[in-house]
Image (cartoon, rainbow, N blue to C red):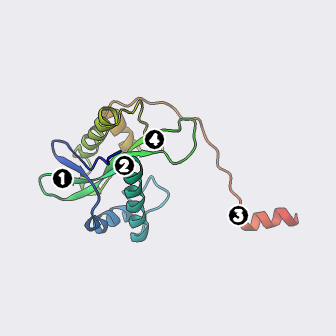
Amino acid sequence: MEPILQLESARLVLRQWRDSDLPEFARMCADPQVMRYFPAPLDRLESAALIGRIRGHFAEYGFGAWALERKDSGEFIGLTGLMNVGFDADFTPAVEIGWRLAREHWGLGFASEAAWTALRCGFDRLQLEEIVAFTTEANLPSQKVMQAIGMHYDPLRHHVLYRITRAQWLDTLHG
């Protein structure tokens, strides 16, 4: 499939990534407020690696997470897009819609506008049958965007997490 290189909405351009996006993207991904619902903020190398994975997704599938740019200023403000879910769950295989915006662009409707544009691409151009979104229960801002673009709540099964440290494992062996 030929990659979908660019989409537009009233105020935004959803476009391919440029090398010049890295400094602002890395700043955004290092912001503890922006990353508060993720395991940890990303450093510059991790941000660059994420851009690389996104580019790879575009090359393989023809779509992915586009860089977000304001039409009025040309400013990079984040990402929005569609990605194949990369893990096994009750709802996979699936395509996920996601977004991440720099803090100074929150509360202006950009996330919903960009997500709506990505949804339209997913259903009209890619002919997807379903698109999912997921987040933590505490991430009310993203849930609000999900609702604003017409998504419907579908509770996930509760999960449990088990851990073992190396020391615990050694204790078990010598137990």
Query: Which residue corresponds to the image point at 37% horizontal and 61% vertical from the top-left?
Result: 51
Up-down: is 75 above or below 4?
below
- The x, y position of residue 111, in whole percent, is 28, 45
Front residue of this view, candidates 68 and 139: 68
Q: Residues under labels 4 and 2: Cα distance?
A: 16 Å
Q: Which image quadrant is residue 172 in?
A: bottom right
Residue matched to label 3: 165
Q: Which of the two marks, 3 or 2, is nearer to us in this view?
A: 2
- The x, y position of residue 113, in whole percent, is 24, 41
Q: Amino acid at mark 2?
A: Gly
Front residue of this view, candidates 150 and 21: 21
Q: Residues under labels 3 and 2: Cα distance?
A: 36 Å
Q: Residues under labels 1 and 4: Cα distance?
A: 25 Å
Residue matched to label 1: 70
Q: Amino acid at mark 4?
A: Phe
Relative placement, left or right, of 140 versus 105 is right
* Chain-order first, disc 2 or disc 1: 2
Q: Residues within 10 Å of mark 2 (few under 14, many from 20)?
A: many
- The x, y position of residue 17, in whole percent, is 29, 59
Kindly identify which numbered label has been placed on residue 43: none
Q: Residues under labels 4 and 3: Cα distance?
A: 29 Å
- The x, y position of residue 53, in whole percent, is 42, 58
Residue matched to label 2: 64
Callout 2: helix, strand or loop? loop
* Chain-order first, disc 4 or disc 2: 2
Q: Residues within 10 Å of mark 3 (few under 14, many from 20)?
A: few
Residue matched to label 4: 134
